[in-house]
Image (cartoon, helix red, strand yellow):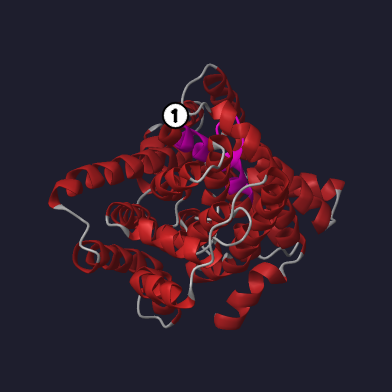
Amino acid sequence: MLTTLVVAFVFFALIGMPIAISLGIASALALAFSPFPTVAAVQKWLTGIDSYTLLAIPLFILAGQLMNVGGVTYRIFNFAQALVGHIPGGLAHANIVASIIFAGMSGSAVADAAGLGLVEMEAMTSHGYDERFSAAVTAASSVIGPIIPPSIPMLLYASIAEESVGKLFLGGIIPGLMMGISMMLLVYFLALKRGYPKEERVRLRQLAAIFIDTLPALLSPVIIIGGMLTGIFTATEAAAVTVGYAFVLSAFVYRELKLKDVPAMLLDTVYSTAVVTFILSAAAAAGWILVRSRAGHAMADFVLSVTSNRYVVLLLLNILLLLLGCVMELGAIMILTVPVLIPLLQNLGIDLVHFGVVMTVNLMIGFITPPFGMSLFVLSGVTGLKVEEIVKDTMPFLIPLIITLLLITYIPGLVMAIPNWLMP
């Protein structure tokens, strides 16, 4: 059964069939040549997305759409520009800071790249920044979105590994900030080398006025995390609260959401949700086959027969995930690998919350890595640049991101400090 699954999946993927369809057909074929009824594939396709936790995914996608349409993204970038625009390469720094702030509202790299991306690109190119560099900064900073809570990938991981969503969300705060700061250091040196401009320092009174205008938007992550920590609502309910809050901001506070914007916004949300759930559904059947085949225990036995050094194993897993992230969709990778890896991680005493954050950071790097980096394609659509043009300027940003990945891999306290403090 396992051999049929792997061979069929590789064959269909190599001939150019979409990953979700390849997984679905491979799962059906594997079950057809097994003692289990073929209808089990259909059952797993349905039960794979029948999860209360996963209900948060379309809600967070809708919240991101509301903020993009309702003027929230513009105000976030305006505040970030006022805050750090006076540093050499100021608008590039503002780009990254805006992504850090927006990350606390949407949980999606695509929403960041598509929503903030347009605002950031227009601002940077109009101030003399190279278009390819502007696109590269925007693509790289968008990967912070799913690291700082809320996070759609962490919701998925929590559902598969049966871990605490709250702990995973809290575990992403320090790594997300590290990613942002390390990229800002790179931008600073590139700005000095290339002579990128800096903006005039904003007076304190003007900064205060911009802060007050942006404050309602900045309260969103406080409401999400605060509500979860105090037990007022769950992660899924937090997503619904975020949608309601984003609607109030867009329609009544900033008054930029118009009735004519709603159909297109809802259609985009439905489309994005359908893409995600189709992949998750197809991968769920394949993941069930892997579990039934005891692939995880077989892998754990094999790896432990070679080395029981947890640091070596973590390095090998990071390399594997980086390679997979270059060619597969994040959700499919998680559903296929997490059930297989859990026995190995438990044998080595690796905390599943720690690994969940490491895995999310790792796979988000794939969003800016060719050939299938999602953020690269989104920015290509926004700017009209070819993907290969954006890739060249994006590559330097892999250095701070991989350094951050290694630090959080081998210093678990960077991930676990806040969860252990607030959710002991």
Q: Which of 302 and 355 is in front in this view?
A: 355
Q: Nearer the viewer, residue 57 or 4?
A: 57
Which percent across, then down, holds residue 319?
73, 43
123 left or right, relative to 319? left
**Residue placed most toward the observer, 90 or 44:** 90
Looking at this view, name the residue that lies furthest to the top: 15
Residue 26 makes an appearance in the image? yes
Q: Does the magenta stretch include residue 369?
A: yes
Q: Looking at the rendering, in which quadrant would you find the C terminus?
A: bottom right
Q: In the image, what residue occupies the spot 48% across and 25% down?
A: 29
The quadrant the N terminus occupies is top right
Q: Please determine whether, in this image, residue 334 is positioned above or below residue 166.
A: above
Q: Is residue 22 above or below residue 98?
A: above
Query: Does residue 63 appear to the left or right of 168 in the view shown?
Result: left
Q: State whether the magenta stretch is mostly helix, strand or loop.
A: helix
Does residue 36 appear in this view? no
Label 1 amino acid? Gly
Stretch of the chain drawn in magenta = 362-380
Q: Position of residue 169 (x, y in %)?
A: 52, 66
Is residue 403 left or right of 67 when viewed as pictured? Answer: right
User: Where 54 sits versus 412, above or below?
Assistant: above
Residue nearest the viewer, comparing 304 with 320: 320
Q: In this rendering, would 69 be left or right of 114?
A: left
| 86 vs 391: above or below | below
Element carrying mark 1: loop
**Residue with the mark numbered 1:** 384
Bin the neighbour count of mark 1 within 10 Å (Cα to Cα): few under 14, some 14-19, many 20 and up: few
